[in-house]
Image (cartoon, helix red, strand yellow):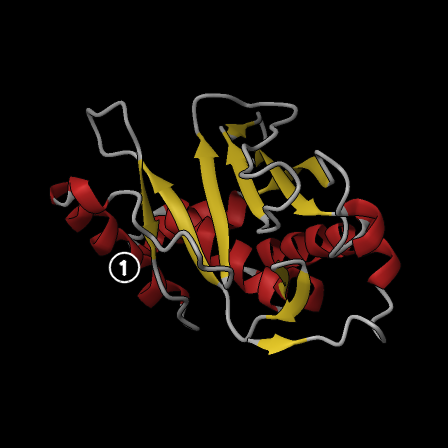
Amino acid sequence: MQWIDVETWQRKPLIEKYSTYVFPYINIGAQLDVTKLYDFSKRHGISFYCAMIYGATKMALEIENFKYRLVDGKPVLCDRLTPVFTYLPKGEEQFYLVEQDFEADMITFCQKAKEKAEAMAHEAEHAYMHGKDEVEILYMSCIPWIHYTHFVRTVEHGGKDNIPRISWGKYLRDKEGNMTMPFSVQVHHALMDGYHVGMYFEKMEAWLDSIE
């Protein structure tokens, strides 16, 4: 993690402006075509949910603004990003949080994430102990029961919480066999703008379309 000199940083005026807001967040949702990723997941026997976590993390790593954080009000640049995702075991009604180091290979990442998530079912006391002071993370969640139009995530300490939150919902397949899914991104406006979120969506779309 590297400290940024706020006095010379071009986003200094935005930090000063949005640090006083109760809800200084950009929240944008859109539909993504996940047909190729879903089919890839089925062919390779991996979790589609974990594959989405992989892709969402991979694209975030390609945009510097997604690696900015505020620590005690001062900007830093993260060296890495680790997804922390919700997991709901079959037959249960309460989720828990799983933190899994990112892997360059999608199949390897998905296998490790699934194994860790299932193993944590027997460690209830650690279900939310993912490191509350960590900043080099991304929060991921899925609402697979709803093909929603918008989804606003919970935040801590109104305005101070600046970790990106990425979510998606229920996928639907049309008559042509194409699958679409709602996907939303919630980020702190002091650290990025709609331009960067738009770039993120473009990268996600391109990645999803490139899968064979």
Residue 42 appears in the picture as rendered:
yes
The quarter holding residue 56 reads: bottom right
Callout 1 amino acid: Gln
Side (left or right) of 49 relative to 6: left
The residue indicated by pointer 1 is: 111
Left/right placement of residue 79 relative to residue 199 reads: left
Q: Position of residue 136 (x, y in %)?
A: 50, 64
Answer above or below: position of 94 versus 184.
above
What percent of the width, then of the height, locates residue 112? 27, 61
Classify 10 Å Cα crowding around label 1: few (below 14), some (14-19), many (20 and above): some
Is residue 212 among the parts visible in the rendering? no
Q: Dot 1 lies on which element?
A: helix
Is residue 119 left or right of 179 when viewed as pictured?
left
Coordinates of residue 82 in the picture (x, y in percent): 44, 62
Q: Residue at x 75, y 76 (%)?
A: 5
Q: Quadrant of residue 158?
A: top right
7 vs 176, left or right, is: right
Residue at horizontal 41 percent and vertical 66 percent from the top:
102
At a point 65% along the width and 60% down the height, the residue shown is: 66
